[in-house]
Amino acid sequence: MAKLTPYIFSEDAKAQAEFYTSALGGEILSVKTFGELPGSNEEMKDKVLHLSLVAGGVPIYMSDSMYQSLDRGNGMHLTLAFDSDAEAHEAFDRLSEGGKVVDPLKPQFWGALFGVIEDKFGVLWQVTTEASV
């Protein structure tokens, strides 16, 4: 059985990881920098090679994007499903700080709350509650 872990390339992985752990609760588990590589480039020494965090109970990996430009697209959303309306509203409000609400968090015909945010880093998030069936 495979395990899917989002890997986010960032312009500032440390700041973005701190935002997610603050907004969703969690912690940064480890940070490896380019400076830890043998023979590393001095100007890249503080850039993040690999960062591991848990936010809202979800493992996420991150890295500073060093070799490619970041063009955010709309082809993928990260979805957070919560057990309670209160948890969903709290996460939605915190993730939207500095970003924009694409679709407000509201009750849907299938019996759950659902909304979409583009956070201040350009990442699209769907926030929902588990539908009661």
Image (tube, rainbow, N blue to C red):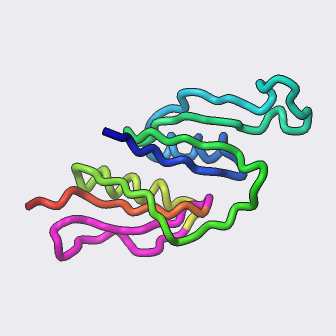
Rendered position, 66 above or below 32: below
**Observer-nearest of 55 and 62:** 62
Q: Residue at x 45, y 63 (%)?
A: 77
Rendered position, 96 above or below 38: below
Quadrant in which the C terminus is drawn:
bottom left
Q: Residue at x 55, y 60 (%)?
A: 123
Outermost residue toward the left in this view: 133
User: Which stretch did the figure color magenta?
Assistant: 100-121
**Observer-nearest of 8 and 56:** 8
For residue 74: magenta?
no
Q: Residue at x 73, y 31 (%)?
A: 33
Q: Position of residue 52 (x, y in %)?
A: 55, 34
Quadrant housing residue 104: bottom left
**Observer-nearest of 86 and 68:** 68
Outermost residue toward the right in this view: 42
**Observer-nearest of 82 and 78:** 78
Q: Residue at x 36, y 54 (%)?
A: 80
Quadrant housing residue 128: bottom left
- So how many labels did they put on this image? 0
Q: Position of residue 46 (x, y in %)?
A: 80, 34
Kindly report the secondary structure that dominates the magenta region of the rendered protein: strand
Q: Position of residue 49 (x, y in %)?
A: 70, 36
Quadrant housing residue 51: top right
Quadrant in which the N terminus is drawn:
top left
Direction from residue 96 to residue 90 in the image, left or right:
left
Q: Position of residue 18 (x, y in %)?
A: 59, 41
For residue 103: magenta?
yes
